[in-house]
Amino acid sequence: MITLPFRKKNKGQIGIALHAGGTTIGQCSWTHGQYNHPTTLHSEVNPREWTSSDWQNFISESNVFGTECVIALPPAIAHHQVLRLPNMSESEIKAAAAWEMADRLGVDRSSLQMDAIPIGSGGDVLAIAIEQYTLSSLLDPIYDAGLQPTAIEPQCVAVARTMSMLHRRQSDQETVRSVLDFGMNDSAFMVLVGDSLMFYKHLDYCGKALIEAIVSHTGVTIDQASRMLAETQTTEQTKDISRAVRDATRSIHEAIATDAMKCTRHYGVTNRGPLSTQLVITGSAGWNSNLANVLSAACNQNVIKDTASKHIHVLPDSVLETNGWHIALGASLAELQTNKNRRGNDHFVKEVA
């Protein structure tokens, strides 16, 4: 049977996003420039504690189909490090990154599972390393549950894919966007050019730190602080609550804005390309008006919420309200044909946008 070039895969596999505090599973397809049939489910149980039975029950409850899956790992599980390496072949880059990560972690190189992803145009490489015993403890129950992992990737790659699905045509390859992925457990700053990840930096800020700051500043309970922070995501806010949240979180927001500005400048120096004019905020703890205002002033960019993107805006609230939805759906589309041989005429790549 001859496979014609226009018969490209658009059905996603099962996407699994693991983090220290829970697991998110998702699946979707991609046609005509939007997600189709998206489904997501989140559990707050630490994935290190899961058995094969737990995975079977979770899969059954999530309404996903198939057995092939792609797993996205955070820095808390798989070590992330941006390295500056000389111009070498892909195999040499991976070997050099493996030795560098083994040295940094103080472990034997043979005990690590490694990958290295070139990012940007200045010689930076994103090295990902995970101890073999850690990986096995995560994967064995997944295999025993009947799933078949086909790829393991860092979560930043899944996030970048989610944010780049409408930027894959040849005419989009000069479009530059900054992305702040701000989650409950950690965060990251990225610069995307077209559909490529050009800059990455892991940040220590997280939504839990904002909630703790509100608790310390106001004396409310954690649940009350969570609701106060959630209220700043809407345009209809109680002035007293908004002021209290702003005052409690100001120092953290200013620190985030300072690091975001440094990241933008570093990208400009190392890549010598056009800077972004738009900063997109995504992540389970990402959007609140106070953070957006501070970022806009510090970075001199238009700060928008991820749902302003038309392919994300159409997702149902049940998906958007799931912690880690963007990582799980991004991982689900990892095997989607990326159409590396782009054409100048966009009519030939309708399936990607």
Image (cartoon, grey):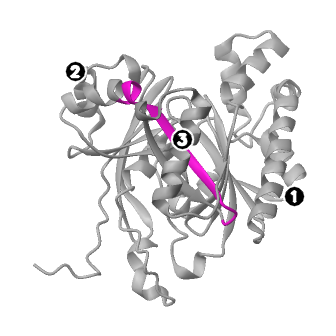
* Picture disc at residue 53: 2
| Residue wearing tag 1 | 300
Of badges 3 and 2, the one in the foreground is 3
Q: Is residue 157 above or below residue 275?
A: above
* Label 3 – label 2 distance at C-alpha: 37 Å
Residue shown at the point (23%, 23%) measured from the top left: 52
**Residue range (magenta):** 121-135
Residue sitting at the far bottom: 345
* Picture disc at residue 99: 3
On the image, which quarter does residue 113 sit in? top left
* Picture disc at residue 97: none
Among numbered discs 3 and 2, the one appearing first in the sequence: 2
In magenta segment, residue 129: yes
Q: Is residue 54 above or below residue 177?
A: above
Task: Describe the element under mark 1 as helix, strand or loop.
Answer: loop
Q: Position of residue 70 (x, y in %)?
A: 35, 46
Question: For mark 3, does the 10 Å Cα neighbourhood hold few (<14), some (14 to 19), or many (20 or more) residues?
Answer: some
Q: Amino acid at mark 2?
A: Ser
Task: Describe the element under mark 2 as helix, strand or loop.
Answer: helix
